Image (cartoon, rainbow, N blue to C red):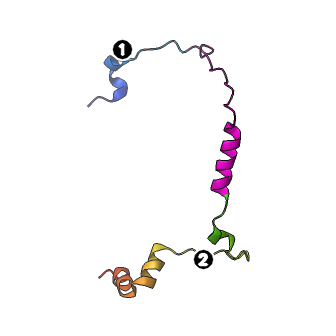
């Protein structure tokens, strides 16, 4: 079987385009409507505001341990975890 590099008929289907730099016209910047930035900042502040549960969470600097799905299965269904671990 000939390789792709040995197929000269594929070369004639390749078309070149005139890709000159500097022909792109950039859109002109527009002024924002009144109140746009104030609304945007208030929405961002709302998203970043912690919920009441997060506000009262202990901030002792000790991170919570990460629980893997296997740890969760072992805690909730120990016999199923042992069967899966042993391959039964």
Q: Position of residue 83 (x, y in %)?
A: 33, 84
* Residue farthest left in this picture: 1
Tag of residue 12: 1
Image quadrant holding the N terminus, namely: top left
* Left or right position of 30 against 68: right
Element under disc 2:
loop
Spatial CA span between label 1 and label 2:
62 Å
Q: Earlier in the sequence, mark 1 or mark 2?
A: 1
Element under disc 1:
helix
* Residue farthest right in this picture: 60
- Badge 2 is on which residue? 65
Q: Position of residue 44 (x, y in %)?
A: 66, 50
Q: Residues within 10 Å of mark 2 (few under 14, many from 20)?
A: few
Mark 1 vs mark 2: in front = 2
Residue 70 lies in what quarter of the image? bottom left
Q: Position of residue 24 (x, y in %)?
A: 59, 17
Q: Position of residue 13 (x, y in %)?
A: 35, 16
Residue 79's place in the image compared with 9, above or below, is below
Q: Nearer the viewer, residue 17 or 35?
A: 35
Residue 68's place in the image compared with 48, above or below, is below
Q: Nearer the viewer, residue 3 or 88?
A: 88
Residue 53's place in the image compared with 2, above or below, is below
Please report the bounds of the magenta region as a residue range: 20-48
Image quadrant holding the C terminus, namely: bottom left
């Amino acid at each position: 079987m000939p390789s792709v590099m040995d197929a000269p008929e594929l070369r004639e289907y390749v078309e070149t385009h005139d890709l000159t730099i500097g022909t792109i016209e950039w859109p002109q910047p527009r002024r924002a409507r009144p109140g746009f930035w104030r609304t945007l900042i208030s929405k961002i502040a709302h998203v970043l505001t912690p919920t009441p549960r997060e506000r009262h969470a202990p901030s002792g600097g000790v991170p919570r341990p990460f629980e893997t799905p296997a740890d969760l299965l072992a805690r909730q269904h120990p016999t199923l975890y042992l069967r899966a671990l042993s391959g039964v």
